[in-house]
Amino acid sequence: MTAASGNREPEATMILVRRTLATLAGITALVLLVTSPAAADPGPPPTSMASLGDSITRGFNACGWYVDCTARSFSTGSHSTVNSHYLRIRTVSPGINGRNHNAASTGAKSADLYGQAGTAVSQGVGYVTILIGANDACTSSESTMTSPAAYRANIDAGLNRIKAGLPNAKVYVISIPDVHRLWSVGRGSGSARTAWSLFGICQSILANPTSTAQADVDRRKRVRQRVIDFNGQLAAACATYGSNCRYDGNAVFGYPFTLAQLSGWDYFHPNTTGQQALAKASI
């Protein structure tokens, strides 16, 4: 997968511009914009943005040993290879330059969204991305996962704070990646299994990664279902929010990421290539 660049042919560049504008306005009929630009008006692109979420949005482990790498964030990052939402917007809205705020926090759960939303409100941004919930499912054990009801309440609290403080901002809610696929692509790697065990990563699904016992198979299915339930709550919460909110339609959950797109230090977080793929999948 290669990132978009300033060397694209004019026609491809215009398609990228229209796709970016469509994303920001929550317009799903992209084909209309490509074939007939006058068919829909996505409105002006933003001149500021904020990203809310957890370690994925912080670019954790994408450039160094157990550190945040915000420049490589799929959302607000400035690294050219990743080609983030921010960089795509900047091609059509130069005024956003330097106004890309990353309010996410490594280790955050849905309960932390309310506080992050307050940060975005204080920054007065015009565009907000939200990707949060992996840590609500990836816990020390299946029994410690967040319930769907609690998760929804946390998401609603965060969205309501954004809506009250930034009534005109566009909000893009992104689905939680499929953690069952994480187990699937990594279980055959000795390095991945060692990292998962050594650092206690997502043990709700990654414990006993080579086991074929029915209890372990069923546990993995239940954890995956919890992520599906969370994503369903995200879709419903965004629909309730109104026309200024767009859900990605499970695009990120359904993205077939590979082991090569994960950090070689923990085999859990996206590396630079993974962040690039996430940026593309979530547009």
Image (cartoon, rainbow, N blue to C red):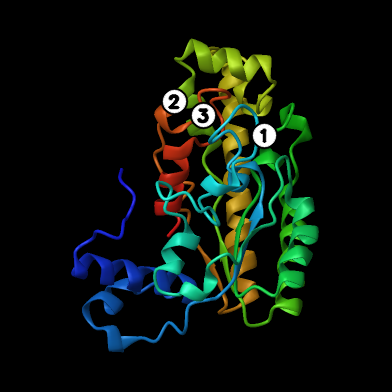
Type of amino acid under label 3: Ser
Residue drawn where x is 53% and y is 76% of the image: 46
* 2 and 3 marks in contact (CB < 8 Å): no
Which residue was labeled with disc 3?
263
* 2 and 1 marks in contact (CB < 8 Å): no
Classify mark 1: residues with Cα within 10 Å, few (<14), some (14-19) or many (20+): many
Q: Position of residue 210 (x, y in %)?
A: 53, 12
Which residue was labeled with disc 2?
185
Whole-angstrom CA distance, mark 2 to mark 1, is: 16 Å
- Return the residue nearer the eye: 67 or 213: 67
Q: Position of residue 1 (x, y in %)?
A: 31, 43
Nearer-N-terminus badge (3/1):
1
Looking at the image, residue 237 lies above or below residue 259 = below
Q: Position of residue 239 (x, y in %)?
A: 59, 71
Say which element carries label 1.
loop
Q: Nearer the viewer, mark 2 or mark 3?
A: 3
- Return the residue nearer the eye: 217 or 135: 135
Nearer-N-terminus badge (2/1):
1
Looking at the image, residue 78 lies above or below residue 186 = below
Q: Is residue 34 left or right of residue 260?
A: left
Q: Is residue 231 left or right of residue 19?
A: right
Q: Nearer the viewer, mark 3 or mark 1?
A: 3
Specify the label residue 138 is tagged with.
1
Type of amino acid under label 2: Val
Q: How many marks?
A: 3
Looking at the image, residue 70 lies above or below residue 113 = above
Whole-angstrom CA distance, mark 2 to mark 3, is: 13 Å
